[in-house]
Image (cartoon, rainbow, N blue to C red):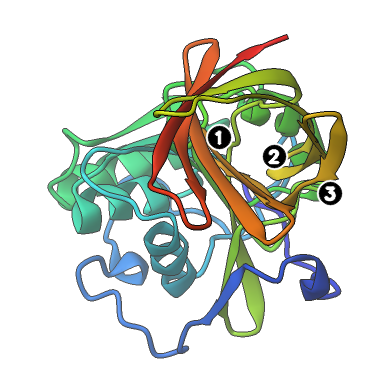
Amino acid sequence: MRPQPRNQAPLNTAIAPCARRRALLASLALGALPLSAFAQSAPAPVFGTPGKDAGWIPTPAPMVEGMLRMAGVSRDDLVVDLGSGDGRIPIFAAKAFGARGLGIELNRDLVAYSVETAKKEGVADRATFVNGDIFEVDFSQGSVISLFMPPQVNARLLPKILAMRPGTRIVSYVFAMEDWEPDDWVFFDNVQGMLWVVPARFEGSWRIQTEGPNPDQYEVTLTQRYQKINGHFLYGNTRLPLFDANVLADRLRFTLVVGERRFDFIGNHKGAALEGTLHVTGESLRRWSATRL
């Protein structure tokens, strides 16, 4: 189901200096999928049809394309639309990107309409629909999750979404995900679509072992709020702050400065450990690994 959009103050871009804002032209064409021209024998969707959590209002077709492109959808993805309405997002994901699409929708008439549309568009083998409640149907296998839900629904979904596989992409039209800062934005007709990438969990204390002819051991303690990392690094007996620390999916990066030397750590989860590369000013690239203390 879809909520009726309402005016919303723009996000504070000062907290997202690295986010790339993008604008879509209102004339963006979706010739591959004429969403407004479907002829169906199932009951046609009625704008504003009430539902359990929200009423049905469709995401504009250019925004559908813009959000899926922003999420980097490919044929390897399973795009799950929570409250899929007339099915336009799973169908477009299948037709334009070759992805698999899954729509979860509480309204049986909308599910029937979506199934017929998928058949007529030739993607019934890749775009499927489930009649059910988004809080009861398991969507944990999705690699891209699409939303157009009011804030209170997004807040209820947030714990389940954060528990998904690191790297899962979340796109939402109009409404944010509590205080989780988006990784990117796309705009159509002055309304926003947002992207988040589910982060792995790196918080805690780690013992780092570097490789090379002169191996070293260090300790780093990390705190984490979504994709934002803070903490300190023990260099000998000196506590040093971290710079440029962030998480993208299961990748961690942070920098520290010791005198005139810069230490750039990049690593990934490898089971319960971390592994990655370290570049120190004036030295060759080294490997490092870390285990929890």
Q: Amino acid at mark 1?
A: Asn
Question: At 59% across and 85% down in the image, what residue appears?
Answer: 189
Q: Position of residue 20 (x, y in %)?
A: 56, 73
Mark 2 residue type: Gly
Element type where label 2 sits in the image: loop
Tell me the distance, in whole angstroms, between the alpha carbons under discs 1 and 3. 30 Å
List the single residue furthest toward the front. 214
Q: Give the Cα distance between marks 2 and 3.
A: 26 Å
Q: Which residue is mark 1?
A: 107
Locate residue 49, reporting x and y percent: 65, 50
- Which image quarter holds the N terminus? top right
Q: Which residue lies under the disc numbered 2?
A: 51
- Depth order, front residue of 125/120: 125
Q: Are marks 2 and 1 in contact (CB under 8 Å)?
A: yes
Q: Is residue 214 left or right of residue 239?
A: left
Lower position in the chain sequence, tag 2 or tag 3: 2
Report the residue at 74% width, 54% height from top. 181
Q: Is residue 52 above or below residue 39?
A: above
Residue 291 image offset from top left, x and y in percent: 60, 13
Tell me which numbered mark, 2 or 1, is placed earlier along the sequence.
Answer: 2
